[in-house]
């Protein structure tokens, strides 16, 4: 007999099997929707299966039991094994397959080649001249050298122009002299810089004849290729333990008048001639679009982080029993409590929303890149840049919240590292800070919004980009019962009102005599609110579009339930705006609540299957609570027994301190 | 020259000194308000000073660099040193002083005597007969034995009645046979159970002649007093690493028909006679009031956790500079950004609110205990019980949020363990789960609310306790400009409306045929909302009362600014209720926002001093970012250099894997 939910196996915890039998859709088909194509969804499963057949690709013990040193060594061991199986496991040039392979085998806590692949090589490709690529790119790709990307400094994050590391050109020797003039100028945070890399791309302020030319990329050898010792003039090390990512050796780096040849300035776009003359790049906006790509990508990755936490929490909630409802003979599954559903299901909806939004945004980005290449039209990119700034911020914020709620929904056991949710949280929530701090990002998004509002106020609504067009929509009364489009309309009106309100406040302060910067700061919180609404509107619209496009009827029906939950949950969350501006009535608010609660009931039978559809392997989840088979308790016990503290019966703390203390008392 | 802020020292980071000079109040006086008395505030400082003079009471290295085993050993070492200095440092019987001493020296990550002091000894005091106390209490107090308290099981948390561990009486041998019948019956989570304790109070289902009498407390020896090996029939160990508290050896415990003498049932209130006859306790509500005490206490402790995170974040925000406002010659302190203020200051207000609320609730508890003892009047206790259930839930939730926002406000460095904020978060957020899971607690609070609403609806408003009296308040229009009382009125109306709405929904489902349990579950989310509003109203009122009672004018003025921020922030946060029910107009909402933003500006010059007033030592904070002297960057570098990964230049991962990989590529 075959079931719609493909995870059903003999011998599983019957509480979980019971859930899977109530699936109203085929989980393989849902996986196709989640991962964007039938082909990739199938390849994922295939790769997972192949990995499971190679014992050397399993963790030697749970990562939670390892020191940082052990985690790093374990990741290197797995990378080493992978390099022998690479071609057998995936199509070597398929980035998505490689990503999936890494996620399963290495996991999310980091590894020494992460920056080598995502930053060192790509920067060589985009910034090194042909001659330079000849020299370094091949070696990098063959992993003869390991590189990273060193930009942020101890005292300097987002503000690139304030980087203090200098690269002063010396025409007499045709060298750049790299130097760290102050302690705040130490490179700080770059991944894999601390102990693993022997090369780095270093961003430093190019100085020629006492004139600063701003930050430029240099390729720098850090360590001796034979001994791996730092070269003289270089101070390099690990920055210490972090909230998560402890399998990564984020590092610090200081230079003491360290000399590199002129040819180490990456010169695809800029050149410094032997005599010190500087040739400017033809166009300055290099890198702008790569930020857009990274931030679009983040919406998907964050969605997948939250999905992992939710798989764990939803499965465990179907296994954990506590308290009674109707039937007094057996405790109920905690998933039957409305409070538990309300804690988890809106996050399930957000997971799907974020992933769909990420998929669409990446496609939009790729289309725009084609436009840029075809006719040099970069207009759409500015819009997408501001949008993805907001998106990155909104998605990481809600993902963090959702993961923590998932953890708490698992009660005490959620708090154990055996759940692995706190680790997922630590990794995901780093996204609130990296790639642009969230508040800064929201204000970047607001910049575009204010500009758009000003266009409308100046009588040029025709100049608005399609993404801003809603700023001209007139107020209307909306009948929520007609469906998703009504929710969009209300959201548009709310977002529009807030964008105008924030802009109005900004202008008011300016009229009263403040400079734009000061007025901007005084309006900043209102501006961030406008950005959030703008972004959430976009997420909501992409969710609707995606669901509408689905052809499989049962998949579409299940996602429609999730969409309805999302629409009502989101609108309720921003209800104060709608109510204050008379856009929504209190009767409508009651309607939304009722819709919300009935959505929870509708989703209940599909909850486990909606999360099973992500088809994360047990290897990738690394969670005792989230095991596919639902056999939680005996495995928690096995896990605990093998933990480091249980390897000896009497700890040194007892021998050295507690025993003598007790003995002394007896005298 | 003397300053109002007592933390000013020569040689400090001038950016921090500048902040301290703008204090409008005396930080010592503020400390008196925070810690409840002039005497205790002074004692705290004195103890801190004494500790600083004993080098052996400093951590041998940062806790973040230690394995769990090392953390436990370190805590034991410090306990050992403390035992030699106890009488020199504190008044030995003063609990608050002992607590302060522990917080500074041991910190928050746990230690092997935590449960011995807070649960093992108190349970012996309240539950053991005089004869039993004679036998064990003295030994426990002298630390001849180390005990813990084992209640929760692998498969059972809040629902005490479902505990599976059995204690079956055998009249023939006059013994109880402790047994763990299933894997879910393993005791799981008790602090210090895993490796440190040799005794435990074990809660087990008392079974006599096949009849279950429910959970009873037994004192059980777990390990040999000489060898510290587990006794035959006992399986005991550590449950493994957790999100935080990794200096505690939370444990598991299983019994295989383990026999203990009849005299090991704690018999102060219940007895089992040699023949197996069971004598009931005279009154059943033992322990009820201790939960109230613990949960009141939590409001204060959580406030102090959040305070620690905020000291760190606020100080660092006064040292970190980034970007420009008016003056283009120097980057501004990030504390000057409105978004940063909005992230931190409302949490500062909450810290004070929670601490004041905790203080008042503990006093209320103590007064009620006197009433109970004087005239057996337990009526007030029920009210306080439901209130503290809500309080525990609301406070822990906002504390978690506030700490995470504080961490993110520190940007990348907040994510480093050098900030220590993620550790504070891990410790604080455990409070969302322990002492009653937050959702369960909110629903417990709701039970009392619904009962009160039903009283009103049944025409018996006179039976309402004072805490519920607002449920009879008629709707009025409120002028917010008159001050705090107006905010209270609005909050009362909102809380009342929601309590009635939720009750109405509950009744509606029951009328439609659902059992009360089922209807309750279908209304659960609305009920939790009512509980939250009820609790937040209480917090708000205690904050107002406390500020009104302060005599020092400048302290009162600074706290009034915080109170105003709190009132406006809270009301804005629940605005949708007020707007939906026509309790507040949209004009009033704009008023609230303006008040909120101007509060931020008012608080700005006092921000550092408001947090300095907590007078946490650097030892207690354990944060490089939060150092009193503000010398953050050089100390981040020193911290990193001494981290474990930097103790060798070439890691095993490089020698074993990366070097061979690179070498192979070169061939």
Image (cartoon, coloured by chain):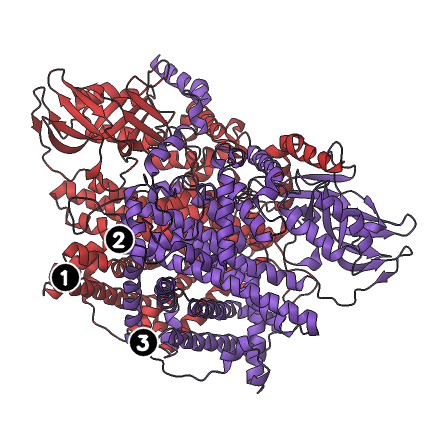
Chain colours: A red, B purple
Which quarter of the figure is the C terminus of chain A placed in?
A: top right
- Judging by the rendered image, the residue that carries numbered circle 2 is B337
In the rendered image, residues at marks 2 and 3 fall on the same chain: yes
Q: Secondary structure at mark 3?
A: helix
Q: Output the chain of dot 3.
A: B
The reply, left or right, for residue A361 in relation to residue A75 is: left
Q: Are marks 2 and 1 in contact (CB under 8 Å)?
A: no
* Distance between the alpha carbons at the discs numbered 2 and 3: 27 Å
Quick check: can you spot residue A284?
yes
Q: Nearer the viewer, residue B268 or B288?
A: B268
Residue at 65% x, 48% y: name it: B117
From where the camera sits, is residue A249 visible?
A: no
Is residue B252 shown above or below A439? Answer: above
Q: Are marks 3 and 1 in contact (CB under 8 Å)?
A: no
The CA distance from mark 2 to mark 1 is 17 Å
Residue under the point 80% across and 55% down: B130
Q: Farthest residue toward the front?
A: B1
Which residue is label 1 attached to?
Answer: A510
User: Share a chain, discs 2 and 1?
Assistant: no
**Helix, strand or loop status at disc 2:** loop
Dividing the picture into quadrants, the one containing residue A216 is top left
Q: CA distance from mark 3 to mark 1?
A: 27 Å
**Looking at the image, is mark 2 or mark 3 earlier in the sequence?**
2
* Neighbours of disc 3 within 10 Å: few (<14), some (14-19), many (20+): few
Q: Nearer the viewer, residue B150 or B384?
A: B384
Residue on which disc 3 sits: B481
Q: Position of residue A78 (x, y in %)?
A: 46, 27
Q: Is residue A75 above or below residue B505?
A: above
Of residues B357 and B81, the one nearer the viewer is: B81
Q: How many residues crowd around disc 2 within 10 Å: few (fewer than 14), some, or many (20 or more)?
A: many
What subunit carries mark 1?
A
């Amino acid at each position: 007999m075959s079931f719609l939910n493909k995870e059903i196996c003999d011998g599983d915890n019957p509480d979980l099997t019971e859930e899977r039998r109530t699936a109203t859709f085929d989980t393989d088909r849902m996986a196709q929707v989640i991962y964007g194509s039938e082909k990739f969804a199938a390849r994922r499963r295939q790769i997972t299966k192949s990995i499971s057949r190679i014992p050397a690709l399993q963790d030697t013990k749970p990562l939670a039991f390892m020191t940082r040193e052990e985690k790093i060594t374990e990741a290197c061991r797995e990378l080493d094994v992978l390099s022998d199986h690479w071609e057998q496991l995936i199509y070597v040039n398929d980035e998505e397959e490689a990503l999936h392979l890494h996620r399963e085998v290495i996991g999310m806590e980091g590894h020494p080649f992460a920056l080598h692949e995502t930053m060192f090589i790509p920067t060589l490709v985009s910034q090194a001249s042909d001659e330079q690529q000849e020299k370094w790119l091949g070696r990098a790709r063959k992993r003869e050298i390991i590189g990273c990307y060193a930009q942020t400094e101890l005292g300097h994050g987002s503000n690139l122009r304030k980087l203090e590391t200098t690269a002063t050109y010396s025409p007499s020797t045709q060298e750049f002299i790299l130097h760290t003039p102050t302690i705040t100028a130490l490179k700080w945070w770059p991944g894999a810089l601390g102990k693993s890399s022997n090369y780095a791309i270093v961003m430093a302020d190019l100085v020629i004849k006492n004139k600063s030319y701003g930050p430029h990329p240099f390729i720098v050898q850090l360590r001796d290729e034979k001994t791996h010792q730092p070269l003289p003039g270089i101070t390099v090390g690990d920055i210490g333990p972090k909230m998560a990512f402890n399998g990564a050796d984020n590092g610090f780096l200081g230079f003491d008048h360290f000399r590199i040849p002129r040819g180490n300035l990456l010169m695809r776009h800029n050149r410094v001639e032997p005599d010190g003359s500087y040739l400017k790049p033809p166009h300055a906006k290099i890198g702008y679009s790569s930020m857009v790509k990274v931030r679009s990508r983040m919406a998907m990755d964050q969605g997948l982080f939250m999905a992992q936490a939710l798989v764990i929490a939803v499965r465990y909630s179907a296994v954990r029993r506590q308290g009674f409802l109707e039937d007094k003979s057996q405790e109920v599954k905690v998933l039957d409590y409305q409070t538990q559903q309300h804690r988890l299901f809106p996050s399930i909806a957000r997971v799907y929303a974020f992933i769909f939004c990420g998929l669409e945004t990446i496609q939009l980005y790729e289309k725009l890149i084609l436009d840029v290449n075809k006719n040099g039209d970069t207009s759409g990119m500015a819009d997408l840049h501001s949008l993805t700034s907001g998106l990155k911020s909104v998605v990481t914020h809600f993902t963090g919240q959702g993961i923590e709620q998932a953890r708490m929904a698992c009660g005490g056991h959620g708090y154990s590292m055996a759940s692995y949710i706190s680790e997922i949280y630590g990794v995901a929530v780093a996204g609130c800070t990296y790639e642009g701090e969230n508040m800064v990002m929201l204000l970047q998004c607001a910049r575009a919004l204010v500009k758009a509002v000003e266009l409308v106020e100046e009588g040029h609504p025709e100049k608005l980009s399609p993404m801003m067009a809603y700023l001209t929509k007139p107020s209307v009364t909306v009948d929520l019962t007609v469906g998703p489009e009504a929710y969009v309309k209300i959201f548009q009106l709310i977002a529009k009102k807030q964008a105008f309100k924030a802009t109005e406040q900004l202008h008011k302060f300016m009229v009263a005599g403040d400079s734009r910067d000061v007025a901007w700061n005084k309006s900043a919180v209102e501006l961030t609110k406008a950005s959030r609404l703008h972004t959430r509107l976009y997420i909501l619209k992409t969710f609707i579009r995606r669901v509408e496009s689905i052809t499989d009827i049962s998949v579409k029906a299940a996602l429609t339930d999730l969409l309805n939950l999302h629409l009502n949950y989101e609108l309720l969350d921003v209800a104060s705006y709608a109510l204050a501006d008379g856009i929504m009535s209190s009767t409508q608010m009651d309607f939304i609540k009722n819709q919300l609660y009935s959505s929870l009931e509708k989703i209940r039978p599909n909850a486990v299957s909606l999360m099973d559809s992500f088809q994360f392997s047990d290897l990738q989840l690394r969670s005792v609570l989230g095991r596919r088979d639902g056999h939680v308790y005996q495995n928690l016990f096995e896990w605990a027994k093998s933990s480091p503290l249980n390897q000896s019966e009497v700890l040194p703390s007892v021998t050295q301190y507690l025993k003598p203390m007790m003995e002394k008392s007896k005298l």
